[in-house]
Image (cartoon, rainbow, N blue to C red):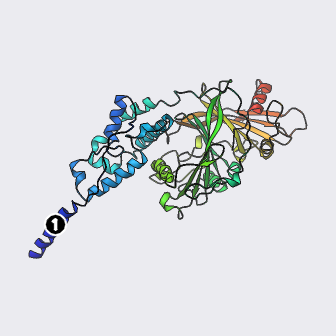
Amino acid sequence: MRAIAKLALFAVAVFIGIQFLRPSIPARPATAELQVPPEIHRILENSCYSCHSNQRRLAWFDEIVPGYWLVRHDILTAREHLNFSTLGAKPPAAQKATLYEAVAMIQFGAMPLSQYLRFHPDARVSPEELASLKAYLAPWSTQPAAATTPIAPTARTNLDTVALEFNGFAFDPTFEDWHLLSITDRGDNNTFRFILGNDIAIKAAQSGNISPWPDGARFAKIAWQQQAGRDGLVHPGNFFQVELMLKDAAGHKQSEGWNWGRWRDLNLKPYGQDARFVNECTGCHQPMRPNDYVYTPPISAAKATLPKSAIPDLLNNAAALPATLPWQPFKWNPITMYVDPKSRTTATLFGNAAAIAAIRANQVSAAGEVVYPQGAVIALVTWMQRDDQHWFGARIPGAPISVEFIDFSSSSQIPEYRRFAGPTLAEETTSPNLAQRAEFIESLPPAQLP
């Protein structure tokens, strides 16, 4: 009995002693606080500021070691990723992007952290508060700038000489030859994106083997600024960036089993200041951990076997094309895309090998339009848009509306136009405005690439 008493006394002494082992949690005045309406500030302050600001706001039980050590680690890590006390110093676009990411985290339940909410239930964001945040951000309320002059052709970058990312990730110059997994229309920052995959990624998507993605799968996410056209459509404008992901479960355990890289502008400058930029990538993709950290659901007719923890919409079956079409556009390369804001539709132009070769050889007419050679076939696939359930402020393809082919294989001077539409994408025997429609599709300029 005396031994137990001594042991208890020793434990109490140790507990009291470690209370003095408490490295500080710096508390500083806000230097550039995010400027938002009072009701939005109240939501953020109540649910986010305890960890994501320079304020030191600990409950009495947070001060008790060893729990204090865990709280301190979480706060310092959170501030490094997002600090509302300094966010106002960043450009407006970066501030807005951060808020969109925060909303995505909240709606997936990734933030506030579940273990934090267990002891701080008042920090929970209610459905009404989340709706207020979304209404304040109002994606697509800002229209892209109108085109003033055509995008001037530029000398192509030597992709073999692109610098390594700061984490040592090498740029993959073959990304333009990969095939399309999906597209996104981002109303949060007025950009378009092609999501391409290498052969391993495409095979995995078409078989439904993406939970997890197999080692060797590579993604390229190519982004352009949106540009409003005179035709009332929104087209890709200037090239913005390309992001690469490589699945290597064993080699990159510290970065969620993926290698990450981002290269900006036509000169493909590596993103960030040092290798710590990867924390930004992994932090943003954290809510999609059940889906192997991948946001955009690939367009595929496959049926995936979902783990119980998977977030719904792992595959975009609704946008898949039937096997009955005379050609399968997804086996070709994408050329460009556009969105019709009035009809809420999105379209992507694909080209077979001959069409792509003509584009890369810069075979254009005096008017600047691509001159497709004999043997070329191009296809314009149009879908209804639907909200991306994985990212607030994005839209992805929904049900396909039509597939239009222009076949330049004929010896005739007039290429053959064929249109497939309706619920089953059956071929139409009569197509109104055939000549005008074919001319429009042929005139679509390829999206700018570095």
Q: Residues within 10 Å of mark 1 (few under 14, many from 20)?
A: few
Report helix, strand or loop for mark 1.
Answer: helix
In which quadrant is the N terminus drawn?
bottom left
Task: Examine the rendered structure and indicate whether residue 296 appears above or below residue 11.
Answer: above
Type of amino acid under label 1: Ala
In the image, residue 55 sits, relative to residue 143, either above or below, namely below
Q: In which quadrant of the rendered view does residue 405 lie? A: top right
Q: Residue 260 location, x and y as percent? A: 55, 54
Residue under pointer 1? 13
Residue 151 position by quadrant: top right
The x, y position of residue 177, in whole percent, is 71, 50
Residue lying furthest right in this view?
A: 411
Against 273, is 147 above or below? above
State the residue in front, 75 or 284: 75
Specify whether 378 is left or right of 399: right
Q: Nearer the viewer, residue 431 or 324?
A: 431
At 59% from the left and 29% from the top, the residue drawn is 144
Mark yes or no: residue 116 visible. Answer: yes
Q: Residue at x 67, y 55 (%)?
A: 199
